[in-house]
Image (cartoon, helix red, strand yellow):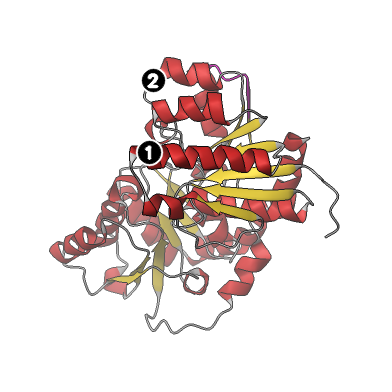
Amino acid sequence: MIKANKKKICIVASSLGKGGAEKSSALLSVMLSDLGYDVYIVTILEFVDYKYKGTLLNLGNIKLKDDTFLGRINRLRIFKKFLKTNKIDVIIDGRARTQAYREFVITKFIYKLPTVYVIHNYKTEKTFTAYKWLNKYLYKNEIMVAVSKAAEIKFRELYQLKNISTIYNGFNFSDIKTKASQDVEINLGVYIIFYGRLDDEHKNLKLLFDAYKLSELSSNGVKLLVLGSGLDEERLKSYVQSIGLLDSIIFRGFEKNPYPFVKKSLFMVLSSRYEGFPMVIPETLSLNVPVIAVDCKSGPNEVIVNKYNGLLVENHNPLALAKAMNSLINDKDLYLQCKSNAQQSVTQFSSAKIAMQWQSILK
C-alpha cells in the first residue's frame, strides 16, 4: 500500500504473545501499517507469537538480562530515547496500568506527546492502579479507548473520564479462514472446544468442567477439547481426573494455529469470570461455529445474540451451562440456525472497518 499517512505511531504492549490483548495490539500494528502509518512497537515482555508490522523495540529481551532496579531505570531511559529518536507523533498504550509508581512516571515523564490509552479488561484491578484518586488524576482528561461498551460505561463513571469511546478489537477474518483450512490430524470424533490461557481465576475452567459433567455430552460421545497452556494446567488436569472425566476432556496443550480445531468443533464454550472483549468469540463465529458463553462482563453480550448465533448463559451456574450444551446437541433446528447466522454476525469486527475507526481517533 502506498504510504498516505505520515504520522508515526508507537504501540506500547505488554508483549506480542500469549493473550488476547497482546494479539489485538499485534493486529492493530498491521491495520495501521496497512493504512499507511509508520508503526513502531514497544513491548514490556519478550514474547512474540503473533504477526505484526512495524519497528519493534523488545524491552522484554533487555529485562531478561537485567531486572534490577537500575535495570528498570535503564529500560525507561531506552524507551524515552526510542520515542524521541523516532520522532513519534502518537502513542497507543495497550498495557495493563496497575503499578502506581510506574504509571505516574510513565504518564508524566515518559509520555510527552499525544497518547491514546486502551482499556482491555473489565476488571478494575487488572486495568488500573489500586488508587482511585490517582487514576482520576492521571487519566481523567486523557483519550481513552475501551474494547467494549460495558467497559466504557463503567470506567467513564468510575473515574469521570471525559474522552472515552469504544473501538472493538479488529479481526482479519480471511487470514483466520486460511489458517483454519490447514490440514491437521485430530481423531476425536465429535467434540466441543475451549481455547485460551489455562488460568482458572480468569477463565473459570472448573465451571466449564462441572457443566460438562452435568450435561449429556459425555454419555453421547461428545468430547471436550481444551487447547492452551498456563500456570493452572496441571491443577486443572488433576481436577478433571478427580471428577472422573480424564477420558472425555482432552488437554492438547498450546496450538499456535488453533483454527483448524475450532472449525471442526461442534461449538465453542467460554466460561470466564470476566473479560474485556473475548477475541475467541468473533474468531469462532467467523468459522461458522456457534458459541455458548456465560454472560460475564464484558463482551459476550455485545457479540452473541441469544439463540441467533449462539447462547448466552447466566454466569457461575453450571446447571444452566449444562442445559445450554444439551440444547445445542439435542435441538438440531436451534443448532443449525446459530450455525447459519454465525459468520455474518461478526462482519462489523473486520479489520478494515475497525481500522477506519482508529483512523478517526488518530486524526
Mark 2: secondary structure: loop
Distance between the alpha carbons at the discs numbered 2 and 1: 26 Å
| Type of amino acid at the residue the image marks with label 2 | Tyr
Quarter of the figure that contains the N terminus: bottom right
Residue pictured at 48% horizontal, 27% vertical: 105
The magenta segment = 158-164
> Would residue 24 appear left or right of 34 to someone viewing this image?
left
- Mark on residue 70? 1
Residue 82 seen in this snapshot? yes
Residue pictured at 38% horizontal, 38% vertical: 70
Residue pictured at 45% horizontal, 58% vertical: 47
Residue pictured at 64% horizontal, 67% vertical: 175
For label 1, the crowd category at 10 Å Cα-Cα, with few meaning under 14, some 14 to 19 and many 20 or more, is few
Mark 1: secondary structure: helix
Q: 172 and 273: which one is in front?
A: 172
The residue that mark 2 highlights is 131
**Looking at the picture, does residue 94 appear above or below residue 212?**
above
From the top left corner, tell me how far across and down residue 55 is, in percent.
64, 55
Which mark sits nearer the N-terminus, 2 or 1? 1
Answer whether residue 44 is magenta in the image. no
From the top left corner, tell me how far across and down residue 254 is, in percent.
39, 68
Q: 83 and 16: which one is in front?
A: 83
From the top left corner, tell me how far across and down residue 57 is, in percent.
56, 51
| Type of amino acid at the residue the image marks with label 1 | Leu
